[in-house]
């Protein structure tokens, strides 16, 4: 069983493009370095995205070097520089998750593909009840204290 990757409120506009908020489609929190192969298509066009982690912006390919965690209640923010017209858009998102605590073979962990294909309405910039994945390299804060 997997959880939905794209929630109803996943797509919103930004001053310089759009933001797509991915929900963790797994049953437990995972290290950010577990996510790879992030791909986004909007209206059947590949769209390049960057990942926002707090005040930093990184490439999806560099998540393997991140020390932070993707908690179940958090959303991974993908920013695209493409401006989208108001209204509905077909959004396809996919990624691969490495599940470090489950064996996928004799010498490797389990690696699972996840994807979602939904029609989402572009919302104005908004705050969500879900937290955004944020990683701080300077301060070590336990999740309970945040």
Image: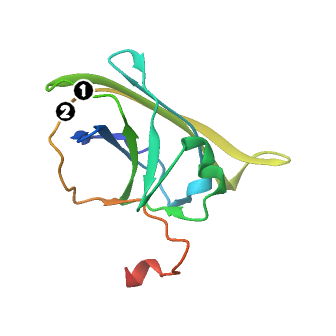
Disc number placed over residue 122 in the picture, else none: 2
The image position of residue 21, as x and y in percent, is 34, 45
Disc number placed over residue 84 in the picture, else none: 1
- Crowding at label 2, few (<14), some or many (≥20) Cα neighbours within 10 Å? many
Q: Which residue shows up at 66% across the image and 56% down it?
A: 65
Horizontal side, residue 51 vs residue 123: left or right: right
Q: Toward the viewer: 101 or 23? A: 23
Q: Secondary structure at mark 1?
A: loop
Q: Toward the viewer: 44 or 48? A: 48
Q: Which residue shows up at 51% across the image and 80% down it?
A: 139
* Image vertical order of residue 93 relative to residue 30, above or below: above
The image position of residue 18, as x and y in percent, is 29, 37
Residue occupying the far bottom of the picture: 145
Quick check: marks 2 and 1 in contact, CB under 8 Å?
Answer: yes
Of tags 2 and 1, which is closer to the observer?
1
Residue occupying the far front of the picture: 16
Residue occupying the far top of the picture: 44
Residue occupying the far right of the picture: 107
- Crowding at label 1, few (<14), some or many (≥20) Cα neighbours within 10 Å? some
Marks 2/1: CA–CA distance: 8 Å
């Amino acid at each position: 069983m997997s959880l939905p990757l794209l929630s109803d409120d996943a797509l919103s506009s930004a001053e310089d493009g759009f933001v797509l908020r991915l929900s963790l489609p797994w049953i437990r929190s995972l290290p950010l370095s577990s996510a790879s192969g992030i791909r986004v298509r909007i209206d059947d066009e590949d769209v390049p995205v960057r990942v926002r982690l707090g005040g930093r912006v990184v490439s999806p390919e560099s998540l393997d070097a991140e020390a932070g965690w993707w908690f179940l209640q958090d959303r991974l923010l993908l920013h695209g520089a493409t401006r989208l017209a108001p209204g509905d858009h077909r959004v396809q998102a996919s990624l691969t998750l490495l599940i470090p605590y489950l064996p996928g073979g004799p010498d490797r962990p389990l690696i699972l593909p996840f994807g979602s294909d939904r029609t989402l309405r572009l919302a104005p910039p908004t705050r969500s009840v879900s937290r955004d994945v944020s990683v701080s390299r300077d301060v070590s804060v336990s999740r309970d204290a945040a």
